[in-house]
Amino acid sequence: MQLLSILLLALIYVPILVSMSFMPYLTRKTISFGITVSEENYNSNQLRQMRKQYASISLVIYSALLIICISLIYSMKGMNDESQSTIIGISLCGMIIASIIMNLIFHFKMKKLSISLPSNSAKKSVLAIDTSFRQKNLILSNKWFIIHGVVIVIGAILVLMNYDKIPNTIPMKFDFQGNVTNSADKSYRTVLFPTITQIVMMLLFIFVNWSIQKSKQQIDAAHPERSISQNTLFRRRWSMFTVLSGLAVIVLFSFIQLNMIYSLDADVMIFVSMSIPAFIVLFAVILSFTTGQGGSRIGESSSSNAQPFKDDMYWKLGSIYYNPQDPSIFVEKRVGIGWTVNFGHPAGSLFLLGIIALIVAVSFITGVN
């Protein structure tokens, strides 16, 4: 593996492991490992120590997995692309499994601890709602995706106009040394598979942007005006991320099309194919740390000992929302940044199944042997 490839791989991995390790610091200050707590308890020494312990253990585990992954790939220079991909895949799966286990351990620990925490039982739990919230400019307009559409159309026109110039055998995949590891015979299906993928990806990003607008509002009753402002900025920033990262993905597939026509240098293709994901990951991590869940890290924060609205009964294992009585389809995550679906709403599961089915169908249609 070239040194540049290792650096780009680390550039993708390191931000991910940092954000996963410090995730408890990014949640709302009324949530601790999936359990509702007051801000007073959240800022207590006991819960501070729990967050430090979680971050320390996670950093050690994820760093070890990253070091093992890079060491294996670097030391085995004759390794083929399939073996490299397997090692990277196992490493990523290891991080995900470790994250799930860590979250479950600390969730049950927090659940047990919450019984002994000082409570504000004398104070009423208040649910605040802003009836004019939906009238605000919460997201970037979907008209921005016209740019994505223009890029897709230009790419499709280019490959069709230059179809005769495209080699009979098209390189489809490269290893970390820039060697071609998979190719396909030229056909309209193979030259247009990036276009079909781009269209599907654009529709998915439009859907994500729409879901940000439609997701359930969550307002801090103790500081409603500040909370509304933070949540509005939170949605706008992630809407901007959706639009820009979507464009980056579209551009990535456009480079694949250009490579079909002009046979770009392998090093250029490797750099582009790894730098764009690195950009998206870095963008997401920076946004997470500067914004926080629900905008909790935006602006100055003043602590409150008010009793937050408690709906822990609807959060299974602290991260899966199931509430048949809630008409909301999309809700804020309790673990992580962003939104999840209400699995108690029929449309919630249908949306996820529909997206998975669409991705599988496109993969089958555009599959290249």
Image: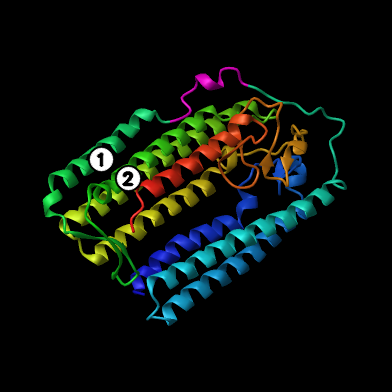
Three-letter residue code for mark 2? Ile
Disc 2 is placed on an element classified as helix
Q: Residue at x 43, y 62 (%)?
A: 11
| Labels 2 and 1: the sequence-earlier one | 1
Q: Residue 82's spot in the image, x, y percent?
A: 41, 69
Horizontally, residue 355 falls left or right of residue 149, namely right
Q: Is residue 296 visible?
A: no
Q: How is the image coloured?
A: rainbow
Q: Residue at x 62, y 27 (%)?
A: 328
Q: Using the image, tell me which numbered label, if any, was put on residue 151.
A: 1
Q: Residue 33's spot in the image, x, y percent?
A: 71, 49
Q: Residue 227's spot in the image, x, y percent?
A: 61, 31
Q: Using the image, tell me which numbered label, if any, was put on residue 111.
A: none
Three-letter residue code for mark 1? Val
CA separation in Å, label 2 and label 1: 7 Å
Horizontally, residue 186 falls left or right of residue 296, namely left
Disc 1 is placed on an element classified as helix
- In the image, residue 72 above or below residue 321: below
Q: Which residue is mark 2?
A: 250
Magenta-tinted stretch: 130-139
Q: Are marks 2 and 1 in contact (CB under 8 Å)?
A: yes
Depth check, front residue: 8 or 206: 206
- In the image, residue 142 above or below residue 258: above
Image quadrant in which the N terminus is located = bottom left
Q: Residue at x 59, y 59 (%)?
A: 96
- In the image, residue 46 above or below residue 62: above
**Secondary structure of the magenta portion, mostly?**
loop
| Residue 256 falls in image quadrant | bottom left
Depth check, front residue: 98 or 303: 98
Horizontally, residue 79 falls left or right of residue 223, namely left
Q: Residue 299's spot in the image, x, y percent?
A: 55, 39
